[in-house]
Image (tube, rainbow, N blue to C red):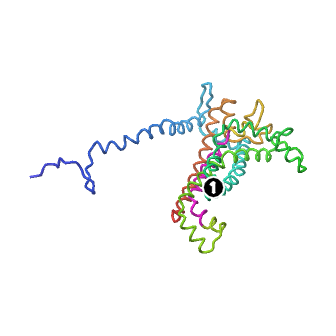
Amino acid sequence: MASPPDPRPRRRRSGAVVSRQERIAGPLFVSPFFLVFAAFGLFPVVFTLWVSLHDWSLLGDRTWVGLDNYRALVEDDHFWNALTNTLGIFVLATVPQLLMALGLAALLNEKIRARTFWRMGVLLPNITSVAAVGIIFTLLFARDFGLVNWTLGHVGVDPIGWQDHRWSSWLAISIMVDWRWTGYNALIFLAALQAVPRDIYEAAEIDGANAWRQFWSITVPLLRPTILFVVLVSTIGGIQLFTEPLLFNSGANAITGGTTRQFQTLTMYLYEKAFTGLEFGYASTIAWVMFLVIAVVGLVNALLVRRLRSVD
């Protein structure tokens, strides 16, 4: 004769009783995140992909075109120009920014006077209004009355039309981005430096390693996961760069990024197609290309982090 089922609650291996309510409570507690993500993260991405397969006007007309928007994008010179500008500004801004942020973090990690004051001060550019930053830097890089050209004039350099040429505009916008985000990244590096045991530095100092040797042989290897994270975040921000170049170009048609589109970024071109040309389907295609670029960079970053397990 079979024995009746055990009415007692199921137990874990550790002996703790797990009731049915407890098993349901966990998913319920985390469900708000997934609901919000599905509504404001997953759905817009999927819907944008659907829109990119249509000739979709913001006025309401829509026609299925399949991959025609993607084929047109490959042959679009303005798109490749915007992609070149985006990558160029990203490289000019990100490489010096991360190097300066790492050096600044190492300096703020030392025992200096008013250390708390300087740590708080490096974050001031980041909390400043981006609109104010764009306007001020546009005035600084003005051709005829800007402070930068006035300073360069004292060393014999003729006035530079910073907005008129590709490389000069890239450099000006990169300086603007570096000024705003270097301190923010420095604080991330500083937080990682605080987790490095001081015993390692003391042992290296006993072995005769100077400050420069300690920085490259101890600090940088131990910060590689943090460096990869900052690089990924900076890449996402660099690919989506919009406000700084938009405010740098004064005039009614600022969205084109100059008279010859010399500093128009991908996000600016997307905005132009969506809200100036009313080509919502084509703009969604540009958005998906940007998403794929970010996804590829994220995958590369994940593979690199997996190779750095020995550092953790």
- Pick the front one: 266 or 145: 145
Q: Residue furthest front?
A: 113
Tell me the quarter of the picture where residue 206 sits: bottom right
- Residue 49: image x %, image y %? 56, 38
Q: Main secondary structure of the magenta part?
A: helix
Q: Residue furthest bottom?
A: 207
- Residue 300: image x %, image y %? 58, 56
Residue 241 belongs to the span the image colors magenta: yes
The residue under the point 51% across, 65% down is: 310
The residue under the point 85% across, 38% down is: 145
- Residue 197: image x %, image y %? 53, 63
Q: Residue furthest left?
A: 1
Q: Is residue 230 above or below residue 253?
A: below
- Pick the front one: 62 or 46: 46
The residue under the point 19% across, 48% down is: 8
Residue at numbered disc 1: 108
- Residue 80: image x %, image y %? 72, 45
Tell me the quarter of the picture where residue 265 sits: top right
* Magenta residues, start to end: 218-242
For numbered disc 1, what is the local secondary structure? helix
Q: Is residue 192 above or below residue 30?
A: below
Give amino acid for label 1.
Answer: Leu
Taking 157 as reference, is 267 left or right?
left
Residue 229 belongs to the span the image colors magenta: yes
